[in-house]
Image: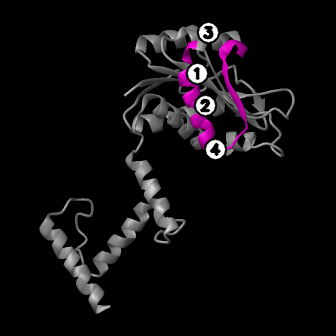
Amino acid sequence: MPKVYIHPGHGGNDPGAIGNGMRESDINLEVALRLEVILTEIGIETRLSRRTDVQINNQRIVIDANSWGAECYIDIHCNAFHLDTANGYETFSPAQHTAFRDAMHHAFLDAITIRDRGAKVDSQLLPGARERLRGVNCPSCLPELAFITANPQHFPDVNILRNQRQDMAQALANGIFDYFGVDDMTQTRFNEMMAEYLRQQGQLAPDQTLGTAARADFERAVINRITDGTRPRQPITREQAAIMVQRGVDLARLQ
């Protein structure tokens, strides 16, 4: 599994861009923390440059990422402009890391409905950002998630930044999975997919999860004496399974 270093841009005395009642540094950090959860769930090692609202020196970030042995580096940011018509998503990287950048870029746009501003080289970035992207000894990119200053009446950017932070984290994770060829089928993801399938089949209510449905089914099984209600999470033998199935068959015949 790859080792992923994540820098949530800005922090501390530097809030980054401010717009529509939000601070860039807060959004960057929340998305980074959510991304970390997704990655660690399937065994990917992660390290964040910051976990709280503090500012970290560029040189310290580069040294930390390199000494840790990072295999990819993600520098999370939001965009801003003095005109509220600017909108969309874009990804930057050094010229030698375009494959990683492109994987991250396409995965994000596959998951989030937003204007594509393109995948670009980092020469357009400020010197500090270029210093980090070029200083690490691994593929690196800087995703500009959306424009915090966009007009929310005309563009989706602000709604995405405010209400789709988990979706953005998943989109970034998908890019990492695609680039490294990682299987992202976790138990949580499988449960979500199965729950959605059962809802489409009308077998699971919109407000139900697999967990709540399973508990309800177990309670009905106890009431109908298919099982005695003990050890609900313990494995059973084939003999016990056969007995429970037969009891269910007998109950169906009576009904």
> Visible in this render: residue 1?
yes
Which percent across, then down, holds residue 203?
46, 71
Mark 4 or 1, nearer chain start = 1
Q: Is the C terminus in the top left, top right, bottom left or bottom right quadrant? A: bottom left
Judged by depth in the image, the label closer to the viewer, 2 or 4, is 2
Q: Secondary structure at mark 1?
A: strand
For image coordinates 46% across by 65% down, the residue present is 198
> Visible in this render: residue 225?
no
Amino acid on which disc 3 is placed: Glu
Q: CA distance from mark 1 to mark 3?
A: 12 Å
Which percent across, then down, holds residue 140?
54, 19
Amino acid on which disc 1 is placed: Cys
Mark 1 in CB contact with mark 2 (< 8 angstroms): yes
Residue at which label 2 appears: 105
Amino acid on which disc 2 is placed: His
Residue at which label 1 appears: 141
Residue at which label 3 appears: 131
Q: CA distance from mark 3 to mark 4?
A: 29 Å
Residue at which label 4 appears: 164
Mark 3 or 4, nearer chain start = 3
